[in-house]
C-alpha cells in the first residue's frame, strides 16, 4: 500500500513523499499513524544528516522516515505476533530500542532516525520485528492520540529523574533518583520539557521539598506558573518558586538565598548554553548531582566543570538521551491515572504538510511542542491564534471555541473535531 511520509536524505534535506510500502512480513506489523509530536532531536537529525549517531545507512540511498513521538492504530499483524497484538488496538512506541548488534552490544537504531519504513511523520508505517522483540511496541488505552504522542517526551523526563544518583559517606552504593525531600533546581526550565519536569517533580511520589525553576523570559515564567501553580505544588508538599535570572547581578547568590542559603541537591539544565551549564555546576551542594538534560546540536559543545568539587564535594554529572521502556510505561500509567497531564507542553497544531519545514525551523519557532496530525493538511498554527484565524475560517473558529473552554489547551474534544473536519493530506 502507499504511504505519505517525510523522509531525510541529507543535511536539511527533508522531503514529503508518497511511495509504496513493501508487503508486510510475518514478523512485521502494519500501522496507521495518527499523531506525532516534533522533537528537538529530529531538528538535530535534520541539521546533521548522516553524521547523526542514530543514522545507520547512507541516507541518499536509503532515506529514513523522521519522527519518533507518535501514536496510532494497528492495521495488520504478521503471524509471528498474532497472539500478542490485535488489529484496531492503539499503540505508542519506545524508540530507544537498544537492539543488540552481532556482538551483543546495544545499538542506537531507532524509529524516526534509522529506518526506511517506520517513523512518526507518516500516514502508514511498517513496524519491524526488532521493535516487538525489544518490547517497545506499547499498548495505549487512552481515548485520545495526543497523550500517546507525548508519552515518549514524558518518558525522557522520567528517565532523567531516575538517572540522578547520590551516595553516603563511606559507601560506594548509588542511591538512584533525586534526593527525596531535598532541593531541586530546574534551569531554563519552562520550555516544553521543563514544564513536563515541573509536573513530574510535583506529582511523582519521590519529590523534592523545594523546587526552584528559572528562566529569562517573564511571559514563559508566567505561563508556567499558571499551568503548574504554586498552590498545586504546595498541596503535594513542594515549595515551588519561579524566578527570572536575567537581571540578577549574582544569580548563584540569589538562588542560594531562595534555598535558605544552601546549595542544591539536584540541578537540571534544560538549555545547551554554556553559562546555564556553568551556573548549574556552581549551584551544586555536597554530593550534588547535575543533570545535563539539553542535547546540543554542536558535537563540540563544552563548558567548565569544577573538578575540585568533583573530588572534594562528591559532585556527580549525568545525562540521558531518552528514557527506556520502563520509563515509557510509567509515563503511560501516570497519564492514564490522571496524575500527569502534559498537554500544556503542546502549543501548535499542524498537518503532515508542515512537518518537514517545522522540523528544520524548530529552534526558531516560539512556544512548546508542535503536534502533527499525519493524515491532515493544515498550516502549523499556534493554539492561541485559533480565534484570530477563526475570523475568516469557521474551522479554526470552532477549534478556538473548544480550546477556550479548556483553558486554552489542546484537548480530546478539539482532537475529535480536527480528525472529523480537517482536510486530508
Image (tube, grey):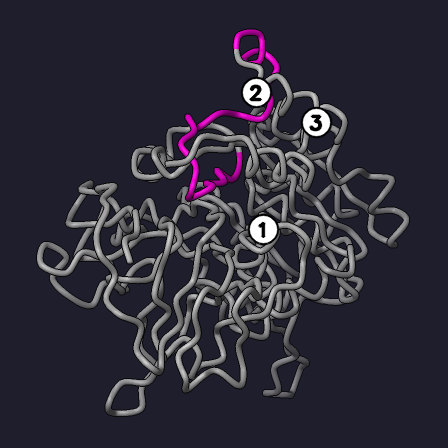
Residue highlighted by disc 2: 396
Residue highlighted by disc 3: 402
- Residue 251: x and y in percent read 60, 36
Please identify the quarter of the rendering in which residue 181 is found: bottom right
Range covered by the magenta-colored residues: 368-392
Residue highlighted by disc 1: 145
Q: CA distance from mark 1 to mark 2?
A: 20 Å
Q: Residue furthest right?
A: 235
Which mark sits nearer the N-terminus, 3 or 1?
Answer: 1
Left or right: 269 as drawn, with respect to 4: right
Q: Is residue 386 magenta?
A: yes
- Residue 259: x and y in percent read 75, 47
Residue at image coords 67%, 82% = 169
Q: Residue furthest top?
A: 391
Residue at image coords 56%, 21% = 395
Which mark sits nearer the N-terminus, 2 or 3?
Answer: 2
Q: Is residue 396 visible?
A: yes
Left or right: 78 as drawn, with respect to 342: left
- Residue 222: x and y in percent read 69, 27
Mark 3 nearby-residue class (10 Å; few <14, some 14–19, many ≥20): many
Amino acid at each position: 500500500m502507499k504511504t505519505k511520509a517525510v523522509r531525510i536524505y541529507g543535511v536539511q534535506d527533508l522531503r514529503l513523499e508518497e511511495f509504496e510500502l513493501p508487503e508486510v512480513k510475518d514478523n512485521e506489523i502494519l500501522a496507521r499513524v495518527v499523531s506525532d509530536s516534533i522533537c528537538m532531536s529530529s531538528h538535530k537529525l535534520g541539521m546533521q544528516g548522516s553524521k547523526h549517531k542514530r543514522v545507520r545507512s547512507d541516507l541518499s540511498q536509503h532515506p529514513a522516515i523522521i519522527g519518533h513521538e507518535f501514536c496510532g492504530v494497528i492495521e495488520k499483524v504478521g503471524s509471528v505476533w498474532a497472539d500478542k497484538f490485535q488489529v484496531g488496538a492503539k499503540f505508542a512506541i519506545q524508540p530507544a530500542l537498544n537492539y543488540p548488534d552481532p556482538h551483543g552490544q546495544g545499538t542506537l537504531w531507532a524509529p524516526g532516525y534509522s529506518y526506511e519504513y517506520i517513523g512518526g511523520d507518516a500516514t502508514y508505517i511498517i513496524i519491524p520485528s526488532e521493535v516487538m522483540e525489544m518490547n517497545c511496541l506499547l499498548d495505549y488505552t487512552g481515548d485520545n492520540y495526543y497523550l500517546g504522542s507525548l508519552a515518549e517526551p514524558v518518558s525522557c523526563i522520567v528517565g532523567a529523574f531516575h538517572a540522578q544518583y547520590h551516595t553516603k559517606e563511606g559507601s560506594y552504593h548509588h542511591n538512584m533518583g533525586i534526593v527525596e525531600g531535598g532541593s531541586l533546581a530546574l534551569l531554563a526550565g519552562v520550555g516544553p520539557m521543563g514544564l513536563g519536569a515541573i509536573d513530574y517533580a510535583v506529582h511523582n511520589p519521590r519529590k523534592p521539598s523545594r523546587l526552584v525553576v528559572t528562566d529569562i523570559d517573564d511571559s514563559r515564567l508566567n505561563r508556567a506558573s499558571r499551568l503548574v501553580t504554586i498552590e498545586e505544588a504546595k498541596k503535594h508538599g513542594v515549595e515551588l518558586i519561579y524566578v527570572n535570572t536575567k537581571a540578577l547581578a549574582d544569580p548563584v547568590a540569589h538562588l542560594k538565598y531562595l534555598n535558605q542559603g544552601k546549595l542544591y541537591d539536584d540541578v537540571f539544565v534544560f538549555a545547551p548554553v554554556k553559562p546555564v551549564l556553568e551556573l548549574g555546576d556552581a549551584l551544586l551542594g555536597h554530593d550534588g548531582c547535575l543533570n545535563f538534560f539539553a542535547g546540543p546540536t554542536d558535537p563540540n559543545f563544552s563548558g567548565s566543570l569544577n573538578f575540585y568539587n568533583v573530588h572534594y564535594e562528591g559532585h556527580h554529572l549525568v545525562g540521558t538521551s531518552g528514557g527506556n521502556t520502563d520509563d515509557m510505561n510509567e509515563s503511560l500509567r501516570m497519564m492514564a491515572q490522571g496524575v500527569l497531564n502534559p498537554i500544556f507542553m503542546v502549543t501548535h497544531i499542524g498537518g503532515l504538510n508542515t512537518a518537514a519545514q517545522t522540523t528544520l525551523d524548530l529552534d526558531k519557532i516560539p512556544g512548546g511542542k508542535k503536534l502533527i496530525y499525519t493524515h491532515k493538511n493544515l498550516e502549523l498554527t499556534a493554539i492561541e491564534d485559533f480565534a484570530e484565524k477563526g475570523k475568516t475560517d469557521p474551522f479554526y473558529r470552532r477549534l478556538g471555541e473548544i480550546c477556550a473552554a479548556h483553558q486554552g489547551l489542546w484537548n480530546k474534544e478539539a482532537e475529535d473535531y480536527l480528525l472529523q473536519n480537517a482536510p486530508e493530506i
